[in-house]
Amino acid sequence: MRICSVRRTSLAIVNLLVLAVAAHGQQPAQPKPAARPAAAKPAAAAAKRPPARPATMPLKTPPAPGEKVVLKVGDEQVSQADLDFVISKLSPEIRQAIARQGKEPIGAQYALMLVLAGMAISHRLDSSPDVRRQIELQRLQVLAQAEYENIVSQTKVSPEEVSQYYAGHAEEFDQAQVREVVIRKKPDGAKEGTLGLLAPEAKAKAEEIRKAFAAGGDPAKVAQDFAVPNVVQIDSQPRSIRRGQLPADLDKAAFQLKEGEVSDPFETPQALVFVQVVGRRHLELKDTSAELESRLRDQKVQASIAELRSKANLWMDEGYFAAPPPSPPSTPATQAPAVNPPPQQ
């Protein structure tokens, strides 16, 4: 088994090693427990253990001629391309840390991975059924991801398709500029200090703010007069929304009311919400063509995947994959009656 294949399918291990070592470095040293005398191992168990392989067994193919070698672990050589590939697959947070601190930590962790992989092979752990399944799972994941990316790269969307979709879905590209007002409610009988207003107070406050907006009040002044941190939130600046981004009633109002008008409050269990319409516009094709191309490509990719699935002659064991039966409702445990202690003599 060569580590070159593991190198690309075990990047998560490198991630975990980096994070684990970083976390370990922040933990206080723990006292070591007193050494215990080694127990004698049964001869039968020792006899069953497979002999170790030579520690010098090659782990990976050597770098190609001309590739720059940046790391050596015994006889193993790691090229710059190897490590650059690993770094490119790490999480953004770790890549940022590497950019600030240098590549030495990731080089050390890659070397440790080679050492551990070499020891695993010498101990024949690569013959373990669980390890082999894990390696095969990672191989399948990498291949599936590669094919998905291949499908995406091969899926094309023409300008004509974008124009046709735009013309047939005109309402999707309506845009409204609204100011949203959210008034947090609290339930009746809430503990003192609970954030929010009781329902009658919330409705009264909503009406005051609606009247201030309807009278043409300056939004910044309205926000200053009525906003309460964590209770009454008022957008002093409008924000743009598209159809379907608000709850149905508010969404309908946002695209029906005239500029300057205020919607009726929409009530949820947690808050009262309403909007003031500041303006509306219709996005032109040039403003949304990139979004539409991405959307249509995704639709085509999903259709291609669905077609692959339909042609795969899939069979599933219904008994194995069936949902478990619903759990019976739990009954509260009956409390034993209190037993009065006997009277003291």
Image (cartoon, helix red, strand yellow):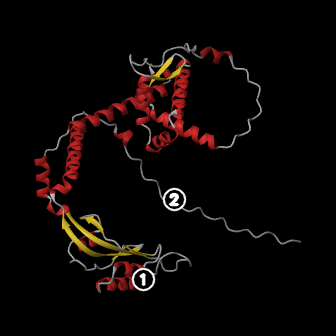
Q: CA distance from mark 2 to mark 1?
A: 51 Å
Tell me the amino acid under the disc marked 1. Answer: Asp
Q: Is residue 155 left or right of residue 30?
A: left
Q: Indicate whether 328 appears above or below 130.
A: below
Give the x, y percent position of residue 13: 49, 34
Label 1: few (<14), some (14–19) or many (≥20) C-alpha neighbours in 10 Å: few
Residue at the right extreme, as displayed: 345
Residue drawn where x is 42% and y is 50% of the image? 325
Mark sitting earlier along the chain (2/1)? 1
Q: Is residue 50 left or right of residue 68?
A: right
Residue drawn where x is 18% and y is 52% of the image? 289
- Which image quarter is the C terminus in? bottom right
Give the x, y percent position of residue 248: 27, 69
Q: Secondary structure at mark 2?
A: loop
Label 2: few (<14), some (14–19) or many (≥20) C-alpha neighbours in 10 Å: few
Foreground residue among 254 and 320: 254
- Which image quarter is the N terminus in? top left
Q: Which residue is mark 2?
A: 330
Q: Is residue 151 left or right of residue 209?
A: left
Q: Nearer the viewer, mark 2 or mark 1?
A: 1
Q: Which residue is mark 1?
A: 225
Q: Is residue 140 left or right of residue 75?
A: left
Give the x, y percent position of residue 203: 38, 83
Q: Indicate whether 215 appears above or below 116.
A: below
Residue 178 visible in this rendered orientation of the protein? yes
CB within 8 Å, label 2 to label 1: no
Residue drawn where x is 71% and y is 40% of the image? 30
Foreground residue among 107 and 59: 107
Tell me the amino acid under the disc marked 2. Answer: Ser
